[in-house]
Image (spheres, rainbow, N blue to C red):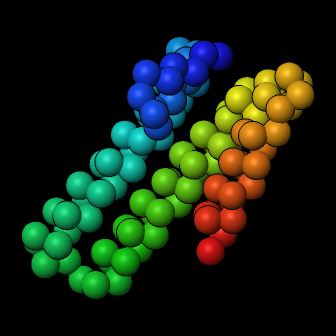
C-alpha cells in the first residue's frame, strides 16, 4: 500500500482488482437507486414509496461504507499499527465517532 502525498491533503491507496470491483458494484447499485428516486419524484410517486426507496439507498450506501471500512482496517490501519504507528487508528476512531452521530 502506498500513500502519495503530492498535495498537502491528497492521499491514495492501491486496491486489489477484486476489492475495486466489489466496491464499484456496490456504488453502482447506490447510483441506480438514487436515479430511481429521482425518477419517482418526476413521476409523482407516492411519498411512502419514495421513502422506502430512500431507505434502500441508505442501506446500500451503508453496506458500501462497511466494506470500505473493513478493508481499511485490515490494510491501512493494521499496517500502520504493525509499523508502530497509531495515526491511522486515531483517524479511524474520529471517523467512527462522526459516523455514529
Image quadrant assignment for residue 44: bottom left
Q: Name the quadrant of the C terminus.
A: bottom right
Q: Is residue 15 visible?
A: no
Query: What residue appears at the point 89 percent right and 28 percent down from the top-left corner?
Result: 84
Q: List x then y, in percent, for residue 37.
A: 26, 65
Q: Is residue 75 visible?
A: yes
Question: Could you tell whether 39 is left or right of 64 in the image?
Answer: left
Number of marks in the image? 0
Question: Could you tell whether 81 is left or right of 61 in the image?
Answer: right
Query: What residue appears at the point 51 percent right and 29 percent down from the top-left corner?
Result: 11
Image quadrant assignment for residue 68: top right
Q: Residue furthest front?
A: 8
Q: List x then y, in percent, for residue 93.
A: 74, 55
Residues 7 and 30: in front is 7
Query: What residue appears at the point 50 percent right and 54 percent down from the top-left corner?
Result: 60
Q: List x then y, in percent, for residue 69.
A: 66, 43
**20 in relation to 2, above or below:** below
Q: Residue furthest bottom?
A: 47
Q: Name the quadrant of the N terminus.
A: top right
Residues 8 and 58: in front is 8
**42 in relation to 47, above or below:** above
Query: What residue appears at the point 19 percent right and 64 percent down from the top-left corner?
Result: 38
**50 in relation to 77, above or below:** below
**17 in relation to 25, above or below:** above
Amino acid at each position: 500500500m502506498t500513500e502519495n502525498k503530492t498535495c498537502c491533503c491528497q492521499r491514495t491507496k492501491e486496491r486489489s482488482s477484486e476489492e475495486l470491483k466489489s466496491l464499484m458494484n456496490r456504488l453502482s447499485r447506490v447510483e441506480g437507486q438514487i436515479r430511481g428516486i429521482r425518477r419517482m419524484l418526476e413521476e409523482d410517486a407516492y411519498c411512502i414509496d419514495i421513502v422506502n426507496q430512500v431507505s434502500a439507498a441508505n442501506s446500500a450506501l451503508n453496506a458500501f461504507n462497511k466494506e470500505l471500512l473493513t478493508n481499511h482496517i485490515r490494510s491501512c490501519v493494521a499496517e500502520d499499527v504493525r509499523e508502530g504507528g497509531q495515526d491511522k487508528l486515531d483517524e479511524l476512531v474520529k471517523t467512527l465517532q462522526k459516523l455514529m452521530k
